[in-house]
Image (cartoon, rainbow, N blue to C red):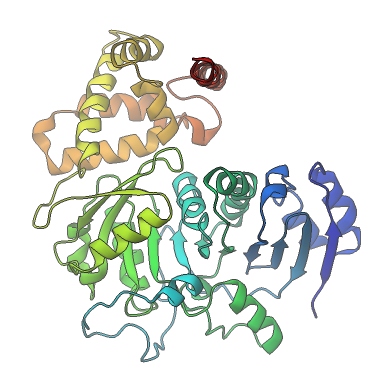
Amino acid sequence: MLSSLSLYISPTATTSVLHSAMANSTPALASQFARSFRPSASFSHTTRPLLYTHSGGGVLARGTRHLTLKHIPPINRSRQFSTARVNYLSTTVPSAFSSTSSPKWRPPSEQCLEERPVLIVGAGNLGRRIALVWASASRPVTIYDEDPAALLEATEYITDNLGEYCTSHGTHPGHVCTTTDMRVATTTGRLEGISQPDEAKECELNSGAKGPWMVIECLPESLELKISLLSQLEHSLPCNCILASNSASLMTSEMAPHLHHPERLLNTHYFIPPRNLMVELMSSSKTHDEIFPFLAEQMRRVGLSPMIVPAGIQSQGFIFNRIWAACKRETLAVLAEGVAKPAEVDMLFRDFFHAEKGPCERMDEIGLDTVARVEGHYLEQRPKLDSARQLGWLTKNYVHQGKLGEKSGGGGLFSREEREAMKRKHSEKRHAAVEETTGA
């Protein structure tokens, strides 16, 4: 039986209103959703309803000022993705889905793009940001993560930022769904775990139905983990679904030999959207040529700026990350040798390049564990880089101590207080620049 709650929320309402209004709802539903679905004044500017779905427990339909919370019985999650290993998710694959053959890739129709979602696997710092950009042009998006807490944090981020982002770009938000069940994420429309037709129909509709037209994996920089996930995903996805890896250093040509369909696999390297909108695209060495112009056009439609590595070229680190890696490597060497402190390095960098941020602040934003994993992979592939000493220093003094930068909420190369002070300073400078330009 559905447990349903509808309430009117003013744009200035707080989370406490949700707690009060959900007093008659199920306790589990109230505790699960109250802390994450926060009313946001930014949505008072939107002209289309925004739908959030969490198929592991409920559906949240968000309009301009109206919110509805419905409970859907959880689907069996006994077979789902794990960071330790990936279990096979479905033993039966209909003929409409992937097979062992390699048919010619055909782009999805305009109607399919409106109905079928982009699937983001991984609700971390980058996954939620990529989801926001794809959802900003009326596109349906599904976010999968096995960790409910990560999904709640991603939902909070999107709730707080999507409406404002759409308003600033003159677009409308699409449906954003979250799930901890990989079967729902990959084969929506075949929901064996839901027995009631009405509930299945509602969950299917809100999840985009028909399966995704593109999957973007946003997992940690582990080749084994990415191969394991992608090799399982391709069996559960529509045969024309694009498989995109958001790796910062791992080439999909390293993953391609382990897949049955490397012709629909490619690298799509995002930076930190929506602030950075460039995306680097590179072939798996087997990728269908037709995918590149099609995907580049879709990216431009949602405000991204694609840059394609020429066919036949495999570049470890793609384009910018090769340049950025050299900067990070020497910055870490300077810090490890005690030549300068992070604040001094960034001060020199900002002054010389007239940049807003220096390399140390950037590394704190990315996450020092990610920086270490990427550099470790570069070192494996190119031992002559001779960066083992600075990598060891970073791992011992920061990663192993949980000092990862922004993602850990605590210390990194800068303390939490130092980062907050820098953010205020950046904001003041941007505001001053706008005022100066306006008055000129």
Whether 328 is drawn above or below 80: the answer is above
Image coordinates for residue 411, horizontal then vertical, percent: 50, 24
Whether residue 196 is visible here, answered yes or no, is no
- Judge by depth and name the residue closer to the eye, 57 or 51: 51
Residue at point 44%, 71% (across, down)? 113
> In the picture, residue 284 is in which quadrant?
bottom left
Q: Is residue 328 left or right of residue 417?
A: left
Whether residue 186 is visible here, answered yes or no, is yes
Residue at point 75%, 70% (across, down)? 71
Image coordinates for residue 440, horizontal then vertical, percent: 49, 15
Whether 71 is drawn above or below 397: the answer is below
Q: Is residue 247 left or right of residue 160?
A: left
Whether 347 is drawn above or below 148: the answer is above
Residue placed furthest toward the front: 440
Residue at point 44%, 82% (across, down)? 90
Quarter of the picture containing the N terminus is: bottom right
Total marks shown come to 0
Residue at point 66%, 73% (across, down)? 74
Q: Is residue 84 left or right of residue 423?
A: left
- Judge by depth and name the residue closer to the eye, 424 or 199: 424
- Judge by depth and name the residue closer to the eye, 21 or 229: 21
Image coordinates for residue 95, horizontal then vertical, percent: 36, 92
